[in-house]
Amino acid sequence: MVSFLLATIIAPFHPQDKAPEPDFRITQKRTLEISGSPYIPVGLKIEPTPEAIAQAQAAGVTDVLVELPLDAELWKRTIAELEAKGMRYVIGLSSLAPAAQVVAVEPQSYRVSGLQGEVNLDISIPGGEKAYAVLASEENGGVLWQGVLPIHNNRLVFQKKVTSQFSYVLVLYPIVKDQRMVDYWEGFDQYRDQLLTILRQAKPGPGFQALLNPLGKVLRGFTNEDPFVPTSELFRIELESFLKQKYGTPQLVTSAWNLGFSEMNSFNELARTVPLWQGQRGIDSVWNLSRDRAVPAERRSRIWDDIRTVILSSASRRLNRLIDAVKANTGKPVIQDWNGWGGSYEEQTGSLDAVGFRLEAQSIINVIDGTSRPLSSATRRVRPMATIATQVQLRGEDAPTVSNVIRQMEAMGVRGWFFTARTAEERQSVAEAASLYRDSLNIANGSPQILYFPEAAMNPAVAGRLPGGYLWLPAPGSGERLDLGEGLEGYRYSDGRRTSFAFWAVGQPRRIKMRLGSEELPKFKVVDGTDLDIKQKKLDVEMTVPISPVILEDAQELPVPIDSFEYSKIGVSYMIDTFGTLVDFNGTEYVRLKGFADSFERSPNATFLSLRQQLRTLIIRAAPYNWIEAENPATTNFGDISSVPGTSDGRSLMLNAKIASSRPHLAQYMVKNRIGGKQDVWIAARMDDVTRQTLQMFFGGYELPIQPNPVSFYGPGFAWYRCGQVEIPEGQSVMTISAPGNELIKCDLDVIMISPPGFIPNGPYPPSGWLWDAVNQARPPQGTD
């Protein structure tokens, strides 16, 4: 284990201080016990005022959660008021976590495109110090100019004359304070000292139950894909130490980082190096901050891996020590609100005791979905961790009641609730629920079995309860939905240690035959206990597949449904025969189909997957609609094409603007419609409501507003939005999706669908019903004349 130079993070106690003995534990059922009894609060999240505390007491509520800034006097007054009213209380930190100063390596976001002639830019970069800048051709990527630019009073000025006829793009790599990365170094030390001093001075009383968000409000957890390089001196010392112990000499670092001619001959200088690429964007160089100039490098460099390893190590070690220090001072548990995959709650053996989460309860479906991810983080952890809803807002006419919310969540494994209430009636409903569920032994002893699926397989998989006492939850592991053909759904999931498959029948159980890779029969597990009635004959196995998931654990591949393979061949053959060169330009599709038929016996799984991909490709070519992959525009100045598992083709067109552009954000598509007439227009995307209202779509002379209330959610947050109806002629038309260049919006576009009226979205799958209707008409069902 690499050792680092760190200052101690626990300030010494004064002689008169005596730390209370911890009097809590997390049970194997993931329930928080305090003083030997379950602590399952049902209460209110309130403002830290005497009036709000009095209102809670008047309603009969005895559990409250208050959020406080780092202000010792306010803590003293609030604690005194809570103790006087006999409350059990959780204190949350309302301050934002200290933000780190970083080099933001986001070439897809910090960019201004369409530059020609006299370029005179005045760019707003709040909190910026300086930036490495690259002016490159949009035509061929050739670099016209690069260097370091100052940022004064949050403004960066760039002036340059571009004589080429082609447009250029200015890409910036600014040094900024960015709230998306917590300062786990100098800023952390100052924050830690303030918090521990307040805990000693304010001294929470007997009613204190837990501390929420010990580092303040964190916008997001750190992940291994974060595009930030801290500029902290403490971080550089840690990175330097890491490099010395991992590589031994600067020359070996230079080799591992694939640096070209390098003037960097010391660990000190290497620890001040920033890669200037992220994904497909950026340049093949690193920024030497010691000399303020770029050095050539290759993207297969290990530099990002090394930087992120040190960041994650620092964050984990320092946050866990802070949590331990809080527990040593108070004797009480520590909770952290969930803010995405990658937070401290994802550590298998970390010091955190519970994960909290906030939720707007608009419907029961919304409640289940909003609970599923925090609960997944808690249940996948080796060390038991409780899950508590730290803020539940009941919103909308169809919002469930307090009791309905609690019943749904407790069946999933949640062990505490704090509601926001605007009226006396709402506070009273919380008090009534508390009389039923507060500290309930029945809730404390419940524990469902968990079945995980990758977020990429959301639709067909869906969070919720399954038969047999199982709970279905999304997880950040790798995997994808499986295309098994009509009537079957499934997915592959890997948590990094083992791989499993799940599949099930749609609508009603189905008797199917599957082809194995070997004669050894895999072990199938059914969550509802249904008898699969398995019959095996050499490589073929016949079974009755239920509508509940069938699990195949520790397997390399899933057996192939033979009927699906045969029907896929029929579908491909029909399209080649019927549509000719429209789907098979030069006969290669026919050759591929023949090859799949010949290779199935040797390699059933790989052959089946390739055939299903061919079927999908030909369906899109021949369909009576236009299925357009959004990441394939004719022209665009959007930020990047991102790899996103769970989308239609595994990629999306991404826009994540960080600086205003002089040119509108634009993506243009050439649409060849073979039918014409009235057409419905849809777009599948991941975006918030502000972005939805900002994006503009123009097609066939129509302006099409993207409508609210999306449907058919799938994958990691994508959904289908209707854009309206147009009437277009047969032939080619132009579609444009744009947004004003000064709008700093974020979105991912997956698919554009232009279809005759009646299209029903189904996640990332192009409709195929038209094909099977045609095939069935051409081939009468078996047993008919």
Image (tube, rainbow, N blue to C red):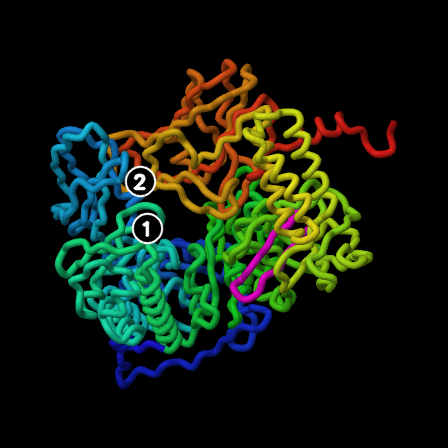
Q: Position of residue 354 (x, y in %)?
A: 48, 66
Q: Which of the pair 245/104 is nearer the observer?
A: 245
Res. 60 in view: no
In the rendered image, the quadrant that contains the N terminus is bottom left
Tell me if mark 2 has few (under 14), some (14-19) or many (20+) residues whose alpha carbon lies within 10 angstroms of its own: many
Of callouts 2 and 1, which one flags the residue occurring earlier in the amino acid sequence? Answer: 1
Q: Position of residue 67 (x, y in %)?
A: 37, 58
In the rendered image, the quadrant that contains the C terminus is top right
> Residue at position x 48%, y 69% from top?
348
- Label 2 SS: loop
> Residue at position x 84%, y 34% from top?
782
Q: Is 696 situated above or below 342? A: above
| Amino acid marked by disc 1 | Gln
Q: Is 380 situated above or below 118? A: below
Q: Position of residue 401 (x, y in %)?
A: 58, 47
Q: Main secondary structure of the magenta part?
A: strand
- In the rendered view, does 206 fall on the left or right side of 72? right
Q: Is 574 situated above or below 595? A: above
Q: Which residue is mark 2?
A: 657
- Label 1 SS: strand
Q: Position of residue 394 (x, y in %)?
A: 51, 46
* Residue 278: image tag: 1
> Residue at position x 72%, y 29% from top?
775
Q: Which of the pair 471/604 is nearer the observer?
A: 604
Spatial CA span between label 2 and label 1: 15 Å
| Amino acid marked by disc 2 | Ala
Q: Is residue 603 magenta?
A: no
Q: Look at the numbered discs 2 and 1 and tell me whether their residues touch, using CB distance below 8 Å.
A: no
Location of residue 272 (image quadrant): bottom left
Q: From which residue to which does the magenta span run?
A: 489-503
